[in-house]
């Protein structure tokens, strides 16, 4: 990105199954965004907390940033943090103070209805979650035509969060005509973070940088 993005701030949401914050998905992501001249901070949302407590923490941070005058707010999340990022991006599309302008998800849990990393689901919605609760916390069920643009990446051999999660969200975005990019790399484990020295998956940062440059140039600030 060739010029500073003083009007843009990214909230970084590390993964960890809603029970921890993965450090390789925290400050290293802030540093990478800084090299793209995008300001970012890590939000260490509440752990081992039931829905909607983590989501409300993101909303509170969004309100703080909007009050501080930030024009464009993005989220970037990984695994369970990717679920939280997507949930925040899709839940408040009509609310100027908590609307998210752009979302980046890495190997995200997107559905509480299909197979996923079970401990994360149990922490967030419990063993006996109703079909309605499982559906309402599944990102594909929340997609509307007003959703913000998404950049999504995953690896096909992820053993913890099946790649079908990303396919399912991308299909819902496509059905609603929402701008998005989906990149699936054939090799790579879960929890890659920046994926340095991880073979083909390491390309995600370059792809995301180009996509963000293009999207941010096109965006009208939703919170402005």
Image (cartoon, rainbow, N blue to C red):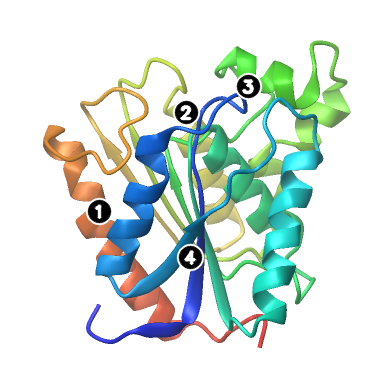
Would you identify the image quadrant in which residue 214 lies? bottom left
Would you identify the image quadrant in which residue 156 lies? top left
Q: Quadrant of the C terminus?
A: bottom right
Task: Mark 2 and mark 1 in contact? Answer it, CB < 8 Å.
Answer: no
The Cα–Cα distance between marks 1 and 3, rounded to whole angstroms, is 26 Å
Task: Mark 1 and mark 4 in contact? Answer it, CB < 8 Å.
Answer: no
Whole-percent x, y for residue 217 in the image: 39, 84
Task: Mark 4 and mark 3 in contact? Answer it, CB < 8 Å.
Answer: no
Question: Which residue in the protein does label 1 denote?
Answer: 205
Say if 53 sits above or below 71 in the image.
Answer: above
| Viewer-nearest residue: 152 or 56 | 56
Left/right of residue 118 with respect to residue 40 in the rendered view: right
First of labels 1, 4 by sequence position: 4
Would you identify the image quadrant in which residue 138 lies? top right
The Cα–Cα distance between marks 4 and 2, rounded to whole angstroms, is 19 Å
Q: Callout 2: helix, strand or loop? A: helix
Say if 188 sits above or below 4 in the image.
Answer: above
Question: Which residue in the protein does label 4 denote?
Answer: 179
């Amino acid at each position: 990105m060739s010029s500073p993005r003083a009007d843009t701030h990214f909230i970084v949401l590390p993964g960890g199954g809603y029970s921890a914050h993965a450090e390789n998905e925290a400050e290293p992501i802030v540093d990478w965004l800084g090299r793209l001249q995008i300001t970012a901070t890590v939000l260490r949302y509440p752990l081992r907390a039931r829905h909607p407590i983590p989501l409300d923490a993101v909303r509170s941070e969004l309100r703080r940033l909007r009050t501080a005058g930030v024009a464009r707010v993005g989220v970037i999340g990984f695994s369970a943090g990717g679920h939280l990022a997507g949930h925040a991006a899709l839940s408040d599309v009509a609310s100027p103070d908590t609307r998210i302008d752009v979302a980046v998800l890495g190997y995200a849990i997107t559905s509480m209805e299909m197979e996923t990393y079970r401990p994360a689901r149990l922490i967030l919605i419990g063993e006996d979650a109703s079909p309605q609760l499982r559906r309402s916390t599944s990102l594909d069920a929340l997609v509307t035509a007003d959703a913000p643009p998404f950049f999504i990446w995953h690896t096909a051999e992820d053993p913890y969060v099946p790649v079908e999660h990303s396919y399912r969200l991308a299909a819902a975005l496509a059905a609603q005509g929402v701008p998005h990019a989906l990149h699936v790399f054939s090799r790579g484990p879960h929890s890659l973070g920046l994926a340095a020295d991880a073979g083909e998956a390491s390309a995600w940062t370059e792809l995301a940088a180009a996509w963000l440059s293009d999207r941010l140039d096109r965006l009208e600030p939703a919170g402005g």
